[in-house]
Amino acid sequence: MIIDAHAHVVAPEVFYAYRAQLLGSGGYHQDPPKLTDESLAQAAAANVAIMDSVGTDVQFISPRPFQQMHSAKPDEIVHRWIRANNDVIAKSVALHPDRLAGVAGLPLCAGAPVASCLDELTRAVEELGFIGVSLNPDPYEGTGGNTPTLGDEFWYPLWEKLVALDVPALIHSAGCYNGREVYSDHFITEESIAVLSLMRSRTFLDFPDLKIIVGHGGGSVPYQIGRWKAARLAPGLGKDVLEERFEVSLRRLWFDTVLYDQASLAYLFQTVGPDRCLFGTEKPGSGSVTDPDTGRSFDDLKPVIEGIGTLTDADRRAIFEENARTVFSRWKGPQPA
Amino acid sequence: MIIDAHAHVVAPEVFYAYRAQLLGSGGYHQDPPKLTDESLAQAAAANVAIMDSVGTDVQFISPRPFQQMHSAKPDEIVHRWIRANNDVIAKSVALHPDRLAGVAGLPLCAGAPVASCLDELTRAVEELGFIGVSLNPDPYEGTGGNTPTLGDEFWYPLWEKLVALDVPALIHSAGCYNGREVYSDHFITEESIAVLSLMRSRTFLDFPDLKIIVGHGGGSVPYQIGRWKAARLAPGLGKDVLEERFEVSLRRLWFDTVLYDQASLAYLFQTVGPDRCLFGTEKPGSGSVTDPDTGRSFDDLKPVIEGIGTLTDADRRAIFEENARTVFSRWKGPQPA
Amino acid sequence: MIIDAHAHVVAPEVFYAYRAQLLGSGGYHQDPPKLTDESLAQAAAANVAIMDSVGTDVQFISPRPFQQMHSAKPDEIVHRWIRANNDVIAKSVALHPDRLAGVAGLPLCAGAPVASCLDELTRAVEELGFIGVSLNPDPYEGTGGNTPTLGDEFWYPLWEKLVALDVPALIHSAGCYNGREVYSDHFITEESIAVLSLMRSRTFLDFPDLKIIVGHGGGSVPYQIGRWKAARLAPGLGKDVLEERFEVSLRRLWFDTVLYDQASLAYLFQTVGPDRCLFGTEKPGSGSVTDPDTGRSFDDLKPVIEGIGTLTDADRRAIFEENARTVFSRWKGPQPA
Amino acid sequence: MIIDAHAHVVAPEVFYAYRAQLLGSGGYHQDPPKLTDESLAQAAAANVAIMDSVGTDVQFISPRPFQQMHSAKPDEIVHRWIRANNDVIAKSVALHPDRLAGVAGLPLCAGAPVASCLDELTRAVEELGFIGVSLNPDPYEGTGGNTPTLGDEFWYPLWEKLVALDVPALIHSAGCYNGREVYSDHFITEESIAVLSLMRSRTFLDFPDLKIIVGHGGGSVPYQIGRWKAARLAPGLGKDVLEERFEVSLRRLWFDTVLYDQASLAYLFQTVGPDRCLFGTEKPGSGSVTDPDTGRSFDDLKPVIEGIGTLTDADRRAIFEENARTVFSRWKGPQPA
Amino acid sequence: MIIDAHAHVVAPEVFYAYRAQLLGSGGYHQDPPKLTDESLAQAAAANVAIMDSVGTDVQFISPRPFQQMHSAKPDEIVHRWIRANNDVIAKSVALHPDRLAGVAGLPLCAGAPVASCLDELTRAVEELGFIGVSLNPDPYEGTGGNTPTLGDEFWYPLWEKLVALDVPALIHSAGCYNGREVYSDHFITEESIAVLSLMRSRTFLDFPDLKIIVGHGGGSVPYQIGRWKAARLAPGLGKDVLEERFEVSLRRLWFDTVLYDQASLAYLFQTVGPDRCLFGTEKPGSGSVTDPDTGRSFDDLKPVIEGIGTLTDADRRAIFEENARTVFSRWKGPQPA
Amino acid sequence: MIIDAHAHVVAPEVFYAYRAQLLGSGGYHQDPPKLTDESLAQAAAANVAIMDSVGTDVQFISPRPFQQMHSAKPDEIVHRWIRANNDVIAKSVALHPDRLAGVAGLPLCAGAPVASCLDELTRAVEELGFIGVSLNPDPYEGTGGNTPTLGDEFWYPLWEKLVALDVPALIHSAGCYNGREVYSDHFITEESIAVLSLMRSRTFLDFPDLKIIVGHGGGSVPYQIGRWKAARLAPGLGKDVLEERFEVSLRRLWFDTVLYDQASLAYLFQTVGPDRCLFGTEKPGSGSVTDPDTGRSFDDLKPVIEGIGTLTDADRRAIFEENARTVFSRWKGPQPA
């Protein structure tokens, strides 16, 4: 069974006109998104067709990240927008309950306390049946206000709630408006910051059951692991509080496979272990481009991973399905044959 | 003949998803708007049907104001968005050349010099056949940077170009994000500021051929005219440079009829004269709501104006058609029967 | 009997030197205003003479608005200045108790909580016998800090106190230093914002006995009433919480007649009703200029209103006297003959 | 003959109401100051009477410093205010040409280039007959923008003009709104900064004929002279470019006697030399308070200086008259008997 | 016995490399200062040798002021740095307990509440045996945030603690980065502000046992005393709350002799009285330069003071020793022979 | 022959006290660093000993990055500090000309134009014999000002000069004070931004001879290569102007081997090719910690690379020596045996 743990909702294009309306009117317009059942069904079907085209059985879908607008003001429009995203996801899942499951967006606005997003988190999980959340560690979206990094106690109310609900968080930033990075670059930056901050903190000591998945293969950290292994052991660099080697700490996290390159994927598995990796493609998305070398889309990662000779069959089962079942424990999809 | 001189393009809803994409990606995404010829034709036909439903022969259409996003950054996305708006308008006009004409949006970004929008102005008029422009006097959209008011020499490069091209400007602000006004309130504020600034300046002495139409019946100024008549004559309030009475100066401007109330329209005509007013409805728009008292939409202004007893037939012809022909002199529509 | 409900104190010119001293010294100088009993008596007598010249029996006088300096720092000098204004008003009233009554300035400083001005409010009403207050809804005076608009709960402590004391508030902004409006323009802008904010809020549901008078004929709102009538009925524009038509809501407010134009006054009476209007002239003030058309001062509004044919005698009595007695219920002036 | 080289105009109190009007209206009001010839004559006569009461023959008068408002915006109102000050001074001088001479205020606004005040400087000297200027080295008046200190080339256009006109500058700051100092404290701070900056710069190498008088006995510098003598000789503190001892450099400046204490005055003369000091009292001003120890006003400095035993008669003549004649060389007052 | 009450620690040069490391790494580096016992002993011995060279028996040493970096961020590095300074001082004192005593630096960071530095204060006094503190009244070091001045209740938690511990505070600012003053200039400015603020406040009424020493001879205040004597008696300048003459208030403070000039020292003694002055040299420091006139270092102040003829022997004993014993009452050094 | 192309100067610890002095005094202190020939010789010898311990023949040394303080103010102290660094490097090289060569720091200050650092670049290369430069692409060091990224024409004056001098630039950021990353994290972020910006720009079309080495194995980019390969081919993501595949573009750059992990090094060589990689260790530095798995220091990379089985002997020669000779073409070290 192939579970794609990192994918985003395929919503009707017109859904994003709603975002423009919220931004343009500053929240004055109260009209809901102009979505018909038919257009939603078409979009969801298109998504399933895409899955079918690459042999994916199930996708766990969250809001399209760069459209989340966590830094928009007033906060009210962010709440309305994220809620609408979760609603669209819930409707898509309802249409294809065996093929889709929901990973909720969180309306954590720039400058707001973490507690402000917990109502929507509860609604998504308890009312809409979502099985995880997508977490943007930089609600300011590069605009300069500095949100404490993930290792800070600022985030504890969220960790408590996630543990209580038994749902994992996928670390994934949103837009980026700092003038030096596009959002796609910023994904990698923020994932790296998130990992390093968590690795230096006592978060996993205080929340041993917390489940964190880092998007895009962990940003830069697996590649730069030597740097952080050395730093962990350096007596003069005291920010790390975990009394274990860095490579051990790193395996407290989970990683997805959104890397679009066989060699880097092989490197990831080698570095953090197949038992900490979840198959993810973010398809359709920025990897939905044909690779002239293979004739397949970059984000058609199933054959790529199957082609990595260093993996055992057990490794592949873990990556493709079992790890996802472990992490997204609320998901009650069909059992493997 | 009924010419509606203040109307906005009816674009397919999905067009505004393009705006969300530009904002969300910070301009990284280069995809054009996802518009089909069919959807454009449907939208334009819908617009014509709306005109038919109220007896309008022609509409002069500009971008939907509150969606213009002049304060968005980087400037590049504003340019792409306004240009796309003008392109959509041009296509709509091309489908119904007898029923529509184009009034261009200007990509004048917050903090940019006026000269930065002149290329698009030239393109719109000379290449696309537009007959006027919509001018936002507050490119910062209420976010705090203070653009010089319209009486300032800051605007002279635009006035020069408008005069050279012989096209009028409709004063109409865009969004508003100051936290104290919604965009609809801000329209009135900015129109008032625009009128007062022009009335106190030497703009019309330096550009006697400049044609300025003030949206929404002139903001607050016609109603507050006594205040400004007195100020003009007060020796201690010396900001006014025009050596004529205020009510004379006011008639250097043109006004539209977007007021949605018969009494206020009657008051407008009485105050500035029917010979300075252009029929305008902004339909479909914020007045597209049924008035329970009449059973007609608030923005179905033709019968409202026809019902004002103080107007002569000549006045009505001026308001409905002739003044528009005078101001939008590049418009070569069919002559009255 | 002619009651002018919107007028400002005529203080000796030297009183304003005290304001310069406070600002210049940043509050270091503790000298009181250099006012003599004689100069105060002269100023008050001059004011009475002005009233006599136009047939006004009584004026309700407040501090000269544009001199209030609510945005000056430190707050202490604003408190001293407003208190000094109220003292001068109280002395003027004491000299002519049958001809003048006090409307207090409030030392609500930019950035301060509403509660900070209540002591002076209490002093003015309970100790000095004032019968109303002048309320500036923009203590920042256009300098950028955004005070919540009047519909916000921010203002509730003031509403509670006003209701408890049974005194009305005249909405009237102060200076304006935003670089785009002079204070006189800003009066109209802020009055419009104030009205729209109150109309969209539940203030009058929570404070049904609150009495609010809007200066200068309600800013732009009566003229733009069609716009707001339509918005109230538009399902997609949900900021309004009052479940009644806009024109009904508008009559929860009171309006003064400071418009200086017969046609606009006639329009005001027609739109909000003579039973919601209070005679006001702001004389002497910005309308104290001779109108060449009439040979009378623009602010000599008694004959202007008397000349409006659509008003009945009862309407005029309401406007000139009875409404003021209703609103300023603490005023115990002589009964009409 | 007793020349008081540091005094400020005694204007009618109502003159400062004009300042309040400019600030309050943001420059909208164009009325001139409400000054009558009679009130001006009274004020000037009062000033002469004060001089007579302490045996002063002549005062060189400049605008009252803390009222100068160089940091007010828009710049236009500063220009109008300073010009009005110079006009009042010129009128006072005209009434008592043997007893008064004018030292001009400069409208150098916060953030403006030095060149912006040169027109008024020229007008004051060439048209109004002024013999010096009062120079505020901190046009921001403590509000945070950092004007380059006096040793910077920023000031060279002013030095050039002063030298060309042969008029001296009296260093004297204006208001102070930094929240930590009142203007009176800030005088001393800014004078100290001014002296140290000039002493470290090459200003006097580039403008050997420049004449600078430092107000209030040189701020803190004469008292702290040991500190700066040591610093000048320290090889590691290289900001000083004058290759001479500090106490030599210090004598490139002139100092006034506005110290209000006999011991400190004796210390000043001892430190910088009587040949560099000009009698000044700033009377009437902050020293116009009776000293219980002497029964005389603190600013009645003539007997205080006469009582300093270490001064010779020649020293006193230099202090009381001759130095002033040297520095204010444009002054053509009556020769000593 | 000669006690030098104002001196700074002579630390090994490499100690300051630790400061660079903290700043450069933003606190990431945890290595302690690279100090050896030998280098510390050398530095301390050098300090004692300097004392010997000028006949000083004891120095009370505090951190080198301009290196304190109170405005550096994050606050954590300031705490580490100040603590390290106090540790170095404690070690120096331990090596020469008869010749040195510790005056603690306080880690009061820009923007932090006073309470945040009390733990280190307690540690220094109770654990390390310090006998006083050095207090920087401008933790922002000229960078613009305005800390309340010393007369404000902001400082009361510190005054309470100082009184409870019976230790005095030496007022001494740190760095200065305002672009208009170097730190050495700023010392004088801040000392002046500190004195004036305390003199105008009720601090000494509320803390009659508080002991404050003002560095560098009191900044500008003793020299400008006439100005403040007059202000204290002026009825219109009401900031002063002490009902006594200014010169009396001034003697509530203590002053050091760090002036480097015989005449100014004589002036200081004359003005505030020898019974309020403590011998201090800040040696080695900015006065450690040979005065060509004397052949001695400017900061060799013992012969300078001995040479002041107006002092009695008792005065000299007070200045050199007894006043220090009174103020630094926790110091239990050897009794005078 | 083993050439370590990425190493930093080993300066006497006391050298960094000079940095503290510059920062603390704001540039007021003019003393040069307190360096003796002996201490310099000791430090250089220590560095050579470190090289000897791991078999390195030559190191190309630049200033210690996190100490560069490009964001410090005033700019003057940055210039003095960087110049002092280059001087120390030059002296070290002079002591061991066969073992060391200089890579210059550039005094490009936050907010300054690129041209401001060219004089020091010229001095370093032409006078001191340096063979390359270390380039910080984020002079603001994370403090918020956004320097244009390396693909911007902002940098063209530097590229022109580097090409003219025939020296390469090593991309390496300095400190980081954004509160979310420590400098070590920021290295990776900035290198990633630098690579992506260059890859999207026409820099290498305009400067085909420009030689850029990216520190730390290219940041995140080689690991995330799939992401950027896909983006390059996506028609909707149009920021890239190079019409070639991303992996081709990437090979326009050079990469060092500062990764401290054999697997990641192997991955790097596989991804960009051994012919684009230069041996580098940054030793001594953050990798100078013993790896418990190997018993060797993490930064002892020679055996690590030698142990990578996929490399040929020719590959190793290229990595260890030949590529460095190609890139640092001004280096005229001894030829290989």
Image (cartoon, coloured by chain):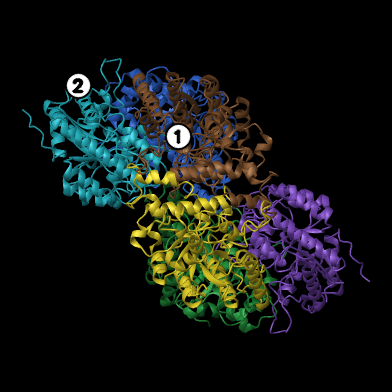
Chain colours: A cyan, B brown, C yellow, D purple, E green, F blue
Residue at (42, 70) in percent of width and height: C166
Relative placement, left or right, of D134 versus F46 is right
Chain of the residue under label 1? B
Q: What is the x, y in percent for residue D133?
A: 76, 58
Q: Secondary structure at mark 2?
A: helix
> Where is mark 2, residue-wise?
A54
Task: Note whether residue E33 is visible.
Answer: no
Image quadrant of residue D132? bottom right
Q: Secondary structure at mark 1?
A: helix
Q: What is the x, y in percent for residue A135?
A: 27, 41
Chain of the residue under label 2? A
Relative placement, left or right, of E328 versus A45 is right
Nearest to the observer: residue E293 or residue B310 = B310
Nearest to the observer: residue C262 or residue C44 = C262
Relative placement, left or right, of D325 versus F296 is right
Q: What is the x, y in percent for residue B284?
A: 40, 33
Q: What is the x, y in percent for residue E305?
A: 65, 74
Residue reaching furthest to the left: A337
Relative to E130, residue F153 above or below: above
Q: Which mark, by number, is residue B302?
A: 1
Q: Amino acid at mark 1?
A: Lys
Crowd around label 1: few <14 · some 14–19 · many ≥20 (10 Å): some
Crowd around label 2: few <14 · some 14–19 · many ≥20 (10 Å): some
